[in-house]
């Protein structure tokens, strides 16, 4: 069955007389990805009269501990309830696997936190780690960097300056907005070449059952894009979380309302996370550092593989987008869901030679028309995400078919690139259909012409 859309159910340089903390820019793969490991356990002298902190004071040494993979140095900052929380966070992410990490203030500017009379305050940091399977940005990407992307989530850290000569102590560590699987109880983890599959220990059997299907879907998806649009493959695999408990899955990775697309379906969901690689493009904007896939339920076999192919397509395209922009996303929802549905349909067709295969989609669209469920072309956001199960399923199929129809208007090899450019520019795909490239100059087909041809091909080929 096709994947179906889900119900859409973000200071610590001390005020010292003689110590200046290094600047922390959100956009250089976070602090940890660019700063050589420091002696995180060597604590600078602190004036007892300090009344303010900046995010950098904790971000710099915490990131250094992550980069050095030094658990003891990381936990040396913890006290009270922060000790078990930080130890659990580290141990879960260590079980998943990471090769570097990063930390910064959520605005990347070392913003100031005022301390009370007892030297206490709360600092918010974006903290994350880079799995060996996560994206690594390279020359030619929109933000032109070769550093690893670091998917991150925000945490509120209660800190205290209580003793002369000591670094701020973290007394409480808690998620700021997004609750990730690694923030909860101990995870059970299994790995294969292109996947990490994790879940709660109570779901160990589910994790075991999902590994082979996840690996097959990951290998197929990576091979698919290596053959058709190799520049999209900037990562070695995918991190997947599974659970049989609907409450657990509903509590993982809720999304901001203005981040549209690249999410998912009732059978699974792909969740982009804020990234710490590359320069912010403007106030409130940041790159997506990577994505995590959540699969609820007990689906197995070819159905699960098709679902994961769909979600893995979202994951591959996700780093080209922005985590958040002040005006919200203007990219139509049908673009990302249509792309993922088209790759999923090609997998289901088991036609390894097809550039894409819409054989099954064609029959389904004609059935949708007979049921009077074929409305807007392209479908509206409400039809893609807000309709009933059947309405959304039809909208997904129409979205995939319209992208295939665009591919038939020009050299098919341009289709996947056009989708990527649509994500980068937050636009419709026919705006960026490449006509020719001369040196650094790229010429695009006329947008109105491409849209008209795609619509004509859609109605002719699918008979509706």
Image (tube, rainbow, N blue to C red):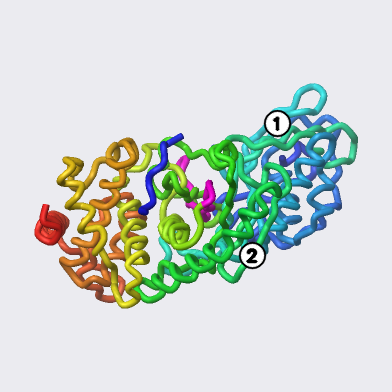
Classify residue 262 as left or right of residue 278.
left
Instruction: Choose top left, top right, bottom left or bottom right for residue 96.
Output: bottom right
Q: Nearer the viewer, residue 263 or 86?
A: 263
Regarding residue 430, the answer to whether it shows in the image is no
Between the residue at mark 1 and the residue at mark 2, the CA separation in whole angstroms equals 37 Å
Q: In the rendering, at what x and y percent does residue 293 appear?
A: 52, 52
State the residue position of label 1. 122
Residue 248 shows in this picture: yes
Q: Which residues are magenta?
A: 283-298
**Residue 426 appears left or right of 152:** left
Using the rendered view, name the quadrant where residue 447 is placed. bottom left
Q: Nearer the viewer, mark 1 or mark 2?
A: 2
Q: Which residue is mark 2?
A: 191
Where in the figure is residue 336, as x and y percent of width and height? 34, 52
For residue 136, above or below residue 458: below
Q: Assign a secondary structure to mark 1.
A: strand
Q: In which quadrant will I find the N terminus?
A: bottom left
């Amino acid at each position: 069955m096709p994947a179906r859309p889900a119900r859409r159910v973000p200071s610590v340089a001390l005020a010292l007389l003689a110590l200046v903390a290094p600047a922390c820019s959100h956009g250089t793969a976070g602090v940890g990805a660019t700063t050589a490991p420091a002696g995180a356990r060597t604590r600078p002298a602190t004036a007892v009269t300090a009344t303010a902190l900046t995010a950098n004071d904790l971000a710099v040494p915490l990131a250094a501990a992550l980069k050095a993979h030094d658990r003891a140095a990381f936990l040396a900052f913890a006290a009270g309830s922060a000790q078990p929380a930080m130890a659990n966070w580290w141990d879960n992410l260590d079980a998943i696997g990471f090769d570097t990490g990063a930390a910064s203030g959520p605005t990347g500017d070392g913003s100031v936190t005022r301390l009370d009379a007892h030297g206490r305050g709360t600092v918010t940091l974006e903290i994350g780690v880079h799995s060996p399977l996560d994206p690594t940005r390279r020359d030619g990407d929109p933000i032109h960097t070769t550093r690893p992307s670091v998917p991150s989530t925000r945490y509120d850290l209660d800190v205290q300056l209580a003793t002369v000569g000591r670094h701020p102590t973290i007394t409480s560590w808690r998620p700021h907005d997004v609750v990730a699987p690694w923030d909860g109880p101990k995870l059970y983890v299994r790995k294969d070449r292109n996947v990490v599959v994790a879940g709660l220990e109570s779901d160990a059997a589910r994790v075991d059952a999902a590994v082979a299907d996840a690996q097959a879907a990951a290998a197929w998806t990576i091979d698919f894009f290596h053959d058709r649009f190799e520049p999209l493959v900037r990562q070695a695999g995918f991190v997947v979380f599974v659970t049989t408990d609907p409450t657990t899955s509903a509590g993982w990775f809720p999304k901001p309302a203005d981040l549209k697309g690249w999410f998912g379906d009732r059978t699974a969901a792909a969740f982009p996370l804020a990234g710490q690689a590359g320069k912010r493009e403007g106030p409130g904007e940041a790159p997506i550092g990577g994505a995590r896939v959540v699969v609820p339920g007990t689906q197995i076999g070819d159905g699960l593989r098709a679902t994961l192919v769909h979600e893995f397509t979202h994951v591959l395209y996700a780093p080209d987008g922005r985590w958040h922009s002040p005006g919200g996303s203007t990219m139509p929802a049908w673009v990302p869901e249509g792309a993922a549905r088209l790759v999923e349909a090609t997998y289901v067709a088991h036609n390894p030679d097809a550039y894409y295969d819409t054989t099954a989609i064609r029959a389904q669209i004609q059935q949708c028309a007979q049921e009077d469920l074929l409305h807007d072309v392209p479908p509206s956001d409400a039809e893609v995400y807000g309709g009933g199960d059947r309405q959304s399923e039809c909208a997904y199929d129409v979205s995939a078919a319209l992208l295939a129809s665009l591919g038939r208007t020009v050299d098919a090899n341009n289709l996947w690139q056009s989708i990527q450019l649509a994500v980068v520019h937050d636009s419709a795909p026919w705006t960026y259909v490449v006509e020719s490239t001369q040196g650094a100059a790229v010429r695009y087909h006329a947008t109105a012409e491409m849209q008209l041809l795609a619509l004509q091909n859609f109605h002719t080929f699918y008979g509706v």
